[in-house]
Image (spheres, rainbow, N blue to C red):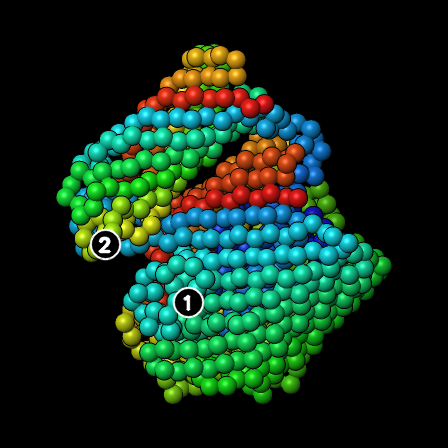
Amino acid sequence: MNSFIRKMISALAVSASFAFASIDAEMEGMEVVSRDDGTFLIGSPTFYFDRALGAGGIHSESELWTPRKLRYRQLFNRLSVLPSWDPIETPSVWMKTGNEVGDLIYQDFLTDVEDRPINRTPILEVGARTPLFHGLWATFRLFQDDHYCFRSAYAYRQYQTDGQFSFFGENWPMFSSAYGGLGYTNDFINASVLAGMEYMWIFTESSRWIPVQYKPRIEARADFGNFSTTLVYENAEYQNHSKKENGERKEVNGSVIYSCGENCKRSMLQLSAGLAFRFVNDDGVVYTALENDRVLWPFLEMRVRPMDKLKFDVMFGVNDRDWLVQDSVEYQVPAFDKMNITVGAKNISGTRLNPIADTHEFFDGDTISLTASGRMNLLQGYVRFEDSLTNFLGFGLRGSFWAEHGAETFKTEKFVKDEIYTFRHGDVDRINSWIKGVTGEFWLKLWYGEMFNFTALTGFERIDGDEKRFEVNPAEFFVAFSADWLIKKMFRISHSLRYRSDAEWNLRSKDPFIVKGDWFWDATFEQRFPKYGITLAGSIIQALGKEVIETPNGDYSRIRFFCTAKKAF
Amino acid sequence: MKKLITILAISLVSLLHAEDPLAFRNDSAAVANDISFSHLSVFLEGGEIYPMGDLMDAVENALYGGVGVRYTYWENVDGVVMFQYAYFKPMTDIYYDGVHQFMGRVGADWKWQLIHPVILGAGFTCSWTRADAEQIYYTKRGGTLTDNETEFGWYARISLPVFKYKEYSAGFHVMWEQLWTLPERSNMLSAGVSIERSIW
């Protein structure tokens, strides 16, 4: 990743760590499980709905393409951090293991076989990155998340694959990944080549889980000067063993981006430009297709800063099929300088939220179109206020109004039941009327140096319009209390207690699939050894809440515990 | 700019994965204050484990033995890592003789200065079990343990190292542990003796 984006991300990460308790994620890309600022519904590590309450529009964040996701994984039509092929930057070794709590152990002696709770399943990750040796380094990582998998494994998915479908165990996890490779880093270039193999279950618009085995997957990256380049080769094998169907997709994808450098960032006009591309070659039954077997997506980013307190950002991408514009303007009101008032507006317009995704899905003789004619338009205006009352107490609020026309949705023609699942036929479509929303968030922060910080955050959203049923009608209300303690700079406790109101999936089953509101508690306890660069951490995730399924055809989100050990070289 | 970043942070918090979780090792003040591992000792221990609550009807009391490492974390707080083994015999009619159980624990011990030499400790525990069975009958009671089963939980412990001689110390301890099992949580109490040798 280029240095600008990396700096931006680290700035965001640092500031985000003040806004949120730093609960360890069970796996890179699973941070959404512990997020408390909107609607986050997890069906599996490879499929979730993630929408922050103040984001505007009815789509989830992972449905939207943006230039900062160039190195995300394309899981069908979603862009996902998991399974991450970002090499860990610190030379270190790490391992992580955990389990959903609730196995029987000796309770088995007292429990009738028919009363046994369903099996609980683990996670596992091991990895290493070597220190530099004349600029050269090596890395490997093996990781697998068996959560959200057990119910569907034996009720449905095991018949789709020919034998075992993971590196470890017999739980049919939703993904299992292993890779290793070499890199070279000096003052001018940061380059790496990784190769590995992956098992993955990808969720589609028909609501099917499709097993895909990447064998091999090879990813090369090079960042030099203001350029970042990525080139990926994937040989993806598709199968449905019970139907004796097999297919293979050979794919080459990647990107190149020129980002605004240090000098350019000081100027009034800042320009970046890039190209994302995919080329596929399908053979046999692959279940999805990309029109013309290729997509080229050139894009341009521009920031204009006519004065310190005013800035415009524009992203524009276009090709022969689609176009997408994301722009925003933000102004710090100088009259209220001491009160830190910001007003801003943003707009997303385009023919498709993710223009580089596949265009068709094939399901039992039906071709599901993943694109819709016409365009969407999302407008949002907001005002934000934040003030520190003393050197240990601050508060803020943010209010916004948004309106969306032509929102992407799914027009269902028929539902089909199969074992525990409900599938759907139809096409991606648009809601050709205005959906309007108003949001409000309020937060209060307390802190004491770097030893303690506490945030209470609450938000509400009211959505209105002619169309009332969206893929997901998000939660209308949340409240969250999170805190980080850092004792003697060596022992960290981070935890968060939060409530989210009901959310509702409307278009993947005949009757709405309601995810009831609930309280959750997550916590991380970490011993740090600064002199030795070691951490030992234990985390409890999704405690308190009732264990429910959060997405149609998804699996139970269970209370789980995992521990992590890391040693930096 | 700070506010912009915070706004963006709210919508882009999924980028948190890019943060270096080991960055604290570059904090020179933290490194200077770090007295961890300034003392390290190893110990052997043994005793008896008593199942509590409904588990009293499931398994018999069992003897256990184990090893551990104790290291300085803060002035009055030690870090502790323990590994233990026990063999549990079922109380009910189960088709095998018993279950091998290995326990790993990570926690901290606080040395109570006021009431010397009382040490109060707590931490996380992980039990790995496997039935001592030749045949696998998954559908019989006890069948789940013929595959490997693991469960996490927490423990609290009081230690009384009353004897001291040069680099050796010995004493008693009592420990309560709870595993997060279903349909009920599993509680056990254990009591035993330990002998510890300071290495540095």
Q: Position of residue A373 (x, y in %)?
A: 53, 84
Label 1: how many Cα within 10 Å (few below 14, some 14–19, many 20+): many
Above or below, B174 relative to B3: above
User: What residue sits 57% from the left and 70% below the top?
Assistant: A217
Q: Nearer the viewer, residue A224 or A471?
A: A224
Residue picked out by circle 2 = B135
Q: Quadrant of residue B182?
A: top left
User: Circle 2 — which element?
Assistant: loop
Q: Nearer the viewer, residue A37 or B25?
A: B25
User: Circle 1 — which element?
Assistant: loop
Q: Nearer the viewer, residue A556 or A317?
A: A556
Q: Nearer the viewer, residue B164 or B120?
A: B164
Q: Locate residue A15 relative to residue A465 in the image: left or right.
A: right
Check contact, mark 2 vs mark 1: CB within 8 A.
no
Above or below, A435 relative to B79: below
Q: Position of residue A371 (x, y in %)?
A: 52, 81
Label 2: how many Cα within 10 Å (few below 14, some 14–19, many 20+): few
Q: Is residue A438 visible?
A: no
* Label disc, if present, on residue A72 of the rendered structure: none
User: What residue sits 29% from the left and 75% below the top?
Assistant: A417
Assign the C terminus of chain A to one quadrant of the image.
top right
User: What residue sits 56% from the left and 80% below the top?
Assistant: A250
User: What residue sits 42% from the left and 35% below the top?
Assistant: B83
Q: Position of residue B94 (x, y in %)?
A: 17, 45
Above or below, A551 relative to B66: below
Q: Is residue A229 visible?
A: yes
Kind of residue indicated by mark 1: Phe
Q: Locate residue A377 relative to residue B164 in the image: left or right.
A: right
Q: Quadrant of residue B35?
A: top right
Kind of residue indicated by mark 2: Gln
Residue picked out by circle 1 = A165
Work out which residue is located at the far front of the displayed protein and give it: B134
